[in-house]
Image (cartoon, rainbow, N blue to C red):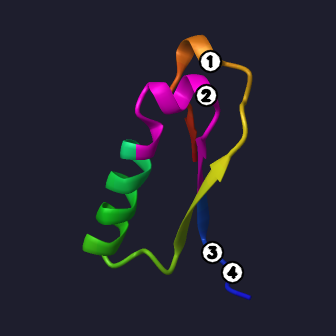
Amino acid sequence: MMIYRSHILICNGTGCVSSKSPAIMEKLQEQLVANGIDKEVKVVKTGCFGLCEKGPIVIV
């Protein structure tokens, strides 16, 4: 099991998905790889945080 320095949580609820959270997740992954920290920081898809009107929600 890998131990990560940080986690980035990205809402995958309906409202956030319609606000482009999958595109944000993809770009974050690309940037982690480009900066060589993809083994230190994990990006995680989550369920709804209940803040749909403010989405897309990303928590570091």
| Residue 41 spot, x, y in % from top left | 52, 68
The amino acid pointed to by label 2 is Thr
The amino acid pointed to by label 3 is Tyr
In the rendered image, which quarter is residue 15 located in?
Answer: top right
Residue highlighted by disc 1: 52
| Residue 55 spot, x, y in % from top left | 53, 22
Residue 19 is a magenta residue: yes
| Residue 16 spot, x, y in % from top left | 54, 28
* Residue neighbourhood size for the residue with mark 1, other residues' Cα within 10 Å, grouped as few (<14), some (14–19), many (≥20): some
- Label of residue 14 in the image: 2
N-term mark: 2 or 4: 4
- Label of residue 4 in the image: 3
Residue highlighted by disc 4: 3
- Is 57 above or below relative to 15? below
Q: Residue at 60% of width from left, 63% of height from top?
A: 6
Where is the N terminus found, in terms of image quarters? Answer: bottom right
The amino acid pointed to by label 4 is Ile
Q: Residue at 55% of width from left, 15% of height from top?
A: 54
N-term mark: 2 or 3: 3
N-term mark: 1 or 2: 2
Check if mark 4's residue and mark 3's residue have beta carbons within 8 Å: yes
Per the rendered image, the range of residues in magenta is 8-22
Element class at badge 1: helix
Q: Is residue 10 visible?
A: yes
